Image (spheres, rainbow, N blue to C red):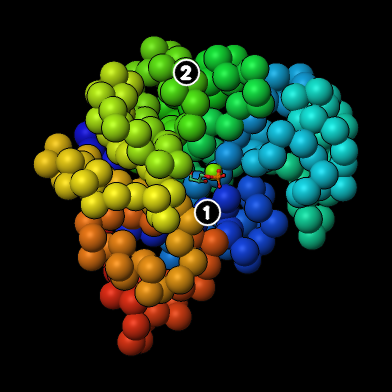
Amino acid sequence: MPLPLPRWIAHRGGGRLAPENTLAGIRVAARLGYRAVEFDVMLSGDGTPVLIHDETLERTTNGAGRVCDTPDSLLFSLDAGQGERIPRFAEAAALCRELGLLANVEIKPAAGHELATAAVVARQTADLWRGAAVLPLLSSFSLAALAVARDVAPEISRGVLFETPPRDWLAEVHRLRAISLHCDADLVRDEVLAEARAHDIPVLCYTVNAPEQAEMLFARGVSGLFTDRLDLLPVSSGAGCKGCRVFS
Ligand code: G3P
Ligand code: MG
């Protein structure tokens, strides 16, 4: 069944309106009318999948050191901003289901942990969304992780994530049996968009925070955008960015 991919996806939960990769961010996105959220998932020192972007704790929490070396007992005691905790993946999944949000789960393995992270996240994804009306979309910059996800949970859709799509991006999409291509908005080339259109593959670009850039990307054929500017949706309900007003 095709995924109902919206044109706008809230980046790292609530973009700039909440601490990144937190439950508060996911709630903000839903409240503002987003139908989809992206968040990053990594394994803790105890092998628990949690929402966090960096391999280290310093930037987004009051902790220090590597996420993959930190036990849950310490990890879940940290402040991830404004009193928010680092969420378990299971908590984020439950919240997305409750709020009716499509989740783009970015598998974000610490270096050297690609296969284990993908196996755990893919298996949990299948379990956590069992019976759901809208299934999530898994993505990763790690092609090795996506190959594991394909084998562990083939029923969960995958998107291939590149900064710049390489020449053989389409072969990778086919090899990984992915449904979408995700890439850096500043690096997407028209020939890639044309090839994607010819093969009916949606292209989703990160991270777009300016209405003019959004409008240009939609005009060039990009299907969806990740944004930190969650306010773009309501702000643009008047004049301005056509792409900001409507979900496809
Ligand atoms: O999944 C799109 C985007 O989140 C990829 O970049 O570094 O923000 O995870 P990053
Ligand atoms: Mg991400």
Q: Secondary structure at mark 1?
A: loop
Q: Is residue 141 above or below residue 246?
A: above
- Which residue was labeled with disc 2? 144
Residue at x 61% of width, y 26% of height: 109
Q: Which mark is residue 11?
A: 1
Residue 132 shows in the view:
no
Q: Secondary structure at mark 2?
A: helix
The amino acid type of the residue labelled 1 equals His
Of the residues under marks 1 and 2, which one precedes in the sequence? 1
Residue 172, horizontal then vertical, whole percent: 31, 24
Is 77 or 131 nearer to us in this picture? 77
Is 11 or 98 nearer to us in this picture? 11
Is 129 or 15 nearer to us in this picture? 15
Q: Is mark 1 within 8 Å of ligand 1?
A: yes
Residue 229, horizontal then vertical, whole percent: 52, 67
Q: Are marks 1 and 2 in contact (CB under 8 Å)?
A: no
**Callout count:** 2
